[in-house]
Image (cartoon, helix red, strand yellow):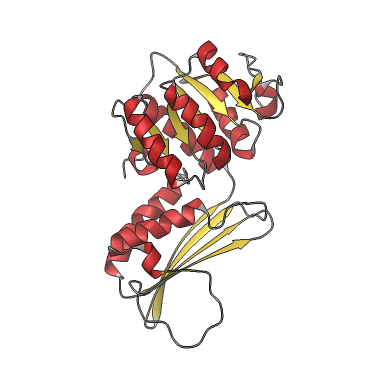
Amino acid sequence: MEVYSILIKLLILGPTGSMGKLISNLALKDNEIDVVAACDVTHIGDDLGFISGVNDPNKIKISDINYLQEVIVETKPDVVVDFTVAKATEKNCKICVENGIKCVIGTTAMTQDFLDEFEKLVKTKKAPAVISPNMATGVNILFKMASILTKYLNDWDIEIIETHHNRKQDNFSGTSLKILDTICEALEVKKEDITKYGRTRGKGLREKGAKNEIGIHCIRAGDIVGEHKIIYAGSGEYIELKHTAINRNCFATGAIRAIKFIAKQKENKIFEMKDVLNL
């Protein structure tokens, strides 16, 4: 493993959320990362180490996100990590990149208008970023396998099914939409031409094959962390690709890898986890 002579100065946004706590816990214990600040809308003034379950020798206190610009000026972070909600990310990560801070973003459901504007800022402010709807290693391997398998099975039926806990706000998940994009890219078709979001009772049989229709479905139930399944069905046989997240540690571990990756990048562009994992 490469050892940094200079620690990565990290700013954590949303450290009191489910993902924020996990990322904070790993970052505070990592000998290549120096957590210099954390900002949120709750637990202002509380000890980050206590919130994330780490005996933090740096004694970082959680700052008010409304004073993000002041925090940036005072602490001068190299990288910011954000796994909050779209509205907050669109506001706060814009401030960060305008200050030349590299971003790692795991937030989903951001608008295309923001992403287009953000990409321009990344280039003009020379602050590359990693944006991914899912930073788990296994999920990104699933994306890669789907891109390969789809090319061989383009005349089979394809269905995408995703399952998450009942508190998840976005339908469909960013990961399932990424799977859909990956499949449509492999098929060389526009997703708006062939995608069926859920199914309702209707008459008649659909045309056969993925180029005519892809179904995507979501389930919200209990405390399921996340499951994504792709079904490729032909005549008398089918193939099923599935990823199951047992807990959120896989996402947090991926975020730490992304932080270390983006800290070294000089090319001013938006990277994906496939770049981080060299896929």
Q: Is residue 31 visible?
A: no
Report the residue at 56% width, 16% height from top.
Answer: 71
Q: Residue 53: percent from the left, percent from the top?
A: 67, 28
Front-most of residues 254 and 154 = 154
User: How many numbered dots are placed on residues in this image?
Assistant: 0
Question: Considering only vertical position in the picture, is 231 above or below 264?
Answer: below
Quarter occupied by residue 35:
top right
Q: Residue furthest bottom?
A: 204
For the point 53% across and 36% down, which residue is it? Answer: 89
Left or right for 133, reference 210: right
Residue 216 image offset from top left, x and y in percent: 48, 66
**Considering depth in this image, is 78 or 247 the residue closer to the camera?**
78
* Quarter of the image with the N terminus in it: top left
Q: Nearer the viewer, residue 20 or 201?
A: 201
Q: Position of residue 57 (x, y in %)?
A: 62, 14
**Which residue is found at the position 44% from the left and 30% from the top?**
103
Asked whether, in this view, residue 2 is left or right of residue 170, the answer is left
Up-down relation of residue 97 to residue 115 (above or below)? above
State which quadrant residue 128 falls in: top left
Where on the picture, by quarter, is residue 149?
bottom left
Using the image as rendered, state which of residue 71 and residue 259 is in the foreground.
Answer: 71
